Amino acid sequence: MDKNFGEIQALLKKYNQEHLLNGYEQLEESKKQELLNQIEKIDFELVNFLYQSTKKEHTFGQDEITPINYLDKYKLNDDYKYYESIGKKAIKEGKLAAVTMAGGQGTRLGHDGPKGTYDIGLDSHKSLFELLSDDLKEQGKKYGVTIPWFIMTSRENNKQTVEFFERHKFFGYQKDKNIFFFNQGELPMMDTEGKVLIGEDGLVKLAANGHGGIYEALVKNHMVEKMKQLGIEWVFIGGVDNCLVKMVDPVLMGIAIDKGVTVACKSVVKANPQEKVGVFCRRNGKPNVIEYTEITDEMAHATDKHGELLYGESHILCNLFNVKAIERMGATPLPYHMAYKKAKYIDKEGNLVVPDSPNAYKFEAFLFDAFGEVDDMAILRVKREEEFAPVKNADSAGVDCPKTARDLYKKFYHLD
Ligand code: UTP
């Protein structure tokens, strides 16, 4: 028996989680150790806190929500060239890196494998990862640089992701030289009584801690250090599932540099006031995103003197950060949001439970909750048809699915 066993038992007793060792004796030796290591790393104070938070009613009433300014990329007139030249200079000087967040579970799409490996059905049968790499390489060439690429994975999909890249010779990138892989943090899932779940493999059921885990993961895995060694000052952070994402945008970068802000985000205008997207706003004076579940009908329809929606700039997970901002954000814990999900688990009696409706809590941090760290940021409205083709759902959903993304991609690149 491992020397930690007694201490682990005591720890679990203290936090009322003794069931985690119920299946211990049946595990193979290597897994026994893994389970103990997992338990040792869990912050049970945080687990308790998160469980308590599931019972609280979330009210946003006290927050003061106000509109935030934005620039429209296609109404910049002479300033367009001005910002562009500033951004171009910085890119040519090798100051830009790209980060792709690929740690999500992609449950809605239902693809068997990491989402980035998904073939959206183009004639080329290129995966999302390859489509992203194509653009990144193409842009790099334009500026005479190789733009370093950092890929965030989760424990669940890291091996498959790296193997996929290996099979494709890293799409011309060189591992640990200009392409880097790192894992994001995880949190245990728990049942409605606050008991941490054991998964089918007999180990603690851990889930990626949301795209808000990016800052901490970049810092803890020494990726920020690596960026600094490479002379990087600006980092574009985007999702893996937008096949039209433009990770290299000199105008966005020029605006950030010229305005002296450390965060600059892209937005697309809401398709209609009811569209279920988060929109940029100020929350208690600080930049933030208001979720569609939070926004009142009145706010969703409110317009300015030009007839534009006051809260019409959708957050599309296309954000540029100064390295210093990432470091600061990585040092500040973000709040966790709770999601109620279906999760298979092994119950206290050792039986596998396969639910047909949600039964477990999962906790995720959201990237935009860190925006409040800065007093000001720039928002640049871009064209949806040029920059936003998300792959979220299976084709049966009819929206934000492989078919819609493929159509947008083909249209943009004139592939028909
Ligand atoms: P989504 O919020 O759309 O989640 O992620 P998802 O995992 O892709 O899909 P569902 O909700 O399970 O169906 C937006 C982006 O953030 C990344 C995803 O990989 C995607 O690029 N992400 C999300 C992470 O990297 N880690 C996470 O924990 C969550």
Image (cartoon, helix red, strand yellow):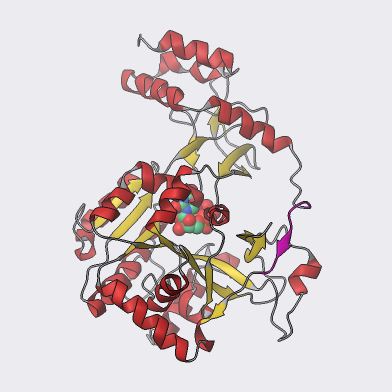
Q: Quadrant of the C terminus?
A: bottom left
Residue sitting at 46 percent across and 14 percent down?
8
For the image, the number of numbered tags is 0
Image coordinates of residue 220 in percent, x first then y, are 37, 41
Q: Is residue 99 left or right of residue 277?
A: left
Which residue occupies the extreme right position in the image?
298
Residue 157 visible in this rendered orientation of the protein: no
- Front-most of residues 32 and 373: 373
Residue 149 visible in this rendered orientation of the protein: yes
Q: Which residues fall within the magenta stretch?
A: 61-67
Dividing the picture into quadrants, the one containing residue 342 is top right
Image coordinates of residue 239 in percent, x first then y, are 44, 61
- Front-most of residues 88 and 17: 88
- Front-most of residues 293 and 66: 66
Residue 341: say if magenta. no
Q: Is residue 95 left or right of residue 348?
A: left
Q: Quadrant of the N terminus?
A: top left
Image coordinates of residue 266 in percent, x first then y, are 51, 71
Image coordinates of residue 237 in percent, x first then y, are 42, 61
Q: Is residue 395 left or right of residue 121?
A: right
Residue sitting at 31 percent across and 72 percent down?
90
Tell me if residue 9 comes above or below residue 271 in the rendering: above
Tell me if residue 184 comes above or below residue 273 in the rendering: above
Residue sitting at 22 percent across and 71 percent down?
145
Residue 63: say if magenta. yes
Type of secondary structure dominating the magenta stretch: loop
Dividing the picture into quadrants, the one containing residue 149 is bottom left
Tell me if residue 91 comes above or below residue 15 in the rendering: below
